Amino acid sequence: MKRILLILIVVLIAGAVAFFALAPGYVERALNPLRMPDEGWPVSAEARTLHQRLVIGDLHADPLLWDRDLLERGNRGHTDVPRLLEGNVAVQVFTTVTKSPRGQNYDQNSAAAPDNITPLFIGQLRPVESWFSLKERALVQARALRNMAARDSDRLRVIRTRADLAAVLEARAGGQQVLGAILGSEGSHPLEGDPGNLEVLFDAGFRIMGLTHFFDNELGGSLHGEGGTGAGLSAFGRQMVEAMIAKDMIIDLAHASPQMVDEVLAIEGTRPILSHTGIRSHCDTPRNLPDQQMQAIAGKGGLVGIGYWSDVVCGGTPADIAGAIRAAVDLLGEDQVALGSDYDGSVDAPFDAANLAALTQALMDAGLNEAQIAKVMGGNMMRYLSEALPGD
């Protein structure tokens, strides 16, 4: 009997080890498919040469959610530091995801629905405090990024200020293969309703704050929440927006309800971004805000980042992404459009970060000239960040 019990214990332990080792990776592979041909997308020598001359930036990616060592080249997902550097990316916004409602969809979600991120964090054996606190989940992901940068500062640096940005760009201009990383939060629910937590997140390195994600929160209404399009900023939300402006934190209106977008834009001093989206008149989906709101964001000097996944560009090829970018340039002007891949954000992508030159080729094929391509691929983002990040 003792021998049987011992065998059962060993089997249970082995099963638990296998689960914690394999299950998170299986989930990530399923949720972040890479739809790239085995032979890759065709890229001409001319496009590759142009691509290597560009200063490239991306406003939104979620690999910190998946607890990978981003200093190592991964065999799943869309991005990591080696692949970003191979794709000639200069600056990447790494966004922390802290809550996702069961049955998540683009139409309507309840904040009270069971959360998908809790079992993921438990399955990844993240620190116990992050199992029960959205703030701690954001801080754990931020700490992971800082630790990776500390381990290899030659390849990865966290950007907190305009001077940090300038130093990264100067190093790259001198030939160093280094990636600048900016921390963002997918929604402001990690504040947990406490104004003091904004300072905590700022001190942890967060410089971009989304207001909502797929559900309404203490700040107000989500594009996909229960309150509908009429749910705007709460009193707490207005207080936090004004506090973010005072700290030179960048406000991200991705996933904000149309009413919230209007109310944020009406506040003096706002210059928000919409980090990852498509253009409604080009791809008619409830995930994309109406064109006039995109124009209002651009009119305030903000940026609109075009995503790579099929739901927002209505197709699964580099040409489909280029078509969405072309539509954005036509709608908003060439100075207000940027990239917002949503890499590793539970979405599909037609190429990973290492194969980003496929997009340069597609933009050339779509008729954008070299100056326009340089702006969209990163020039607009660098200009905006050099003006919007904290000065010290």
Image: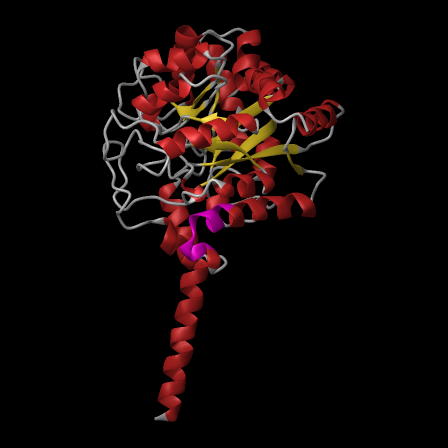
Q: Residue at x 55, y 40 (%)?
A: 199
User: On the rendered structure, is 4 left or right of 270?
Assistant: left
Is 135 included in the stretch rendered in magenta?
yes
Quarter of the image where one finds residue 388: top right
Residue 305 in the image, given as x and y percentages of width and height:
45, 22
Q: Residue at 54% across / 41% down in the picture?
A: 201
Would residue 207 be counted in the magenta stretch? no
Residue 164 horizontal/vertical position (percent): 68, 30
Residue 283, percent across and down? 30, 18
Residue 74 position within the rendered picture, expressed as x and y whole percent measured from the top left: 53, 45
Q: Is residue 95 above or below residue 274?
A: below
> Which residue is most to the right?
174
| Colour pattern | secondary structure
Pick the front one: 337 or 36? 337
Residue 350 in view here: no
Residue at 57%, 29% (x, y): give it: 247
Q: Quadrant of the N terminus?
A: bottom left
Name the residue: 69% across, 44% down: 152
Using the image as rendered, state which of residue 121 and residue 69 is in the foreground.
Answer: 121
Q: What residue span does the magenta drawing correspond to?
A: 130-138
Q: Can see residue 22?
A: yes
Task: Work out whether 313 lies above or below 370.
Answer: below
All told, the count of numbered labels is 0
Is residue 29 toward the left or the right of residue 157 in the image? left
- Quarter holding the C terminus is top right
Magenta stretch: dominant SS? helix
Residue 103, placed above or below residue 23: above
Q: Nearer the viewer, residue 219 or 41?
A: 219
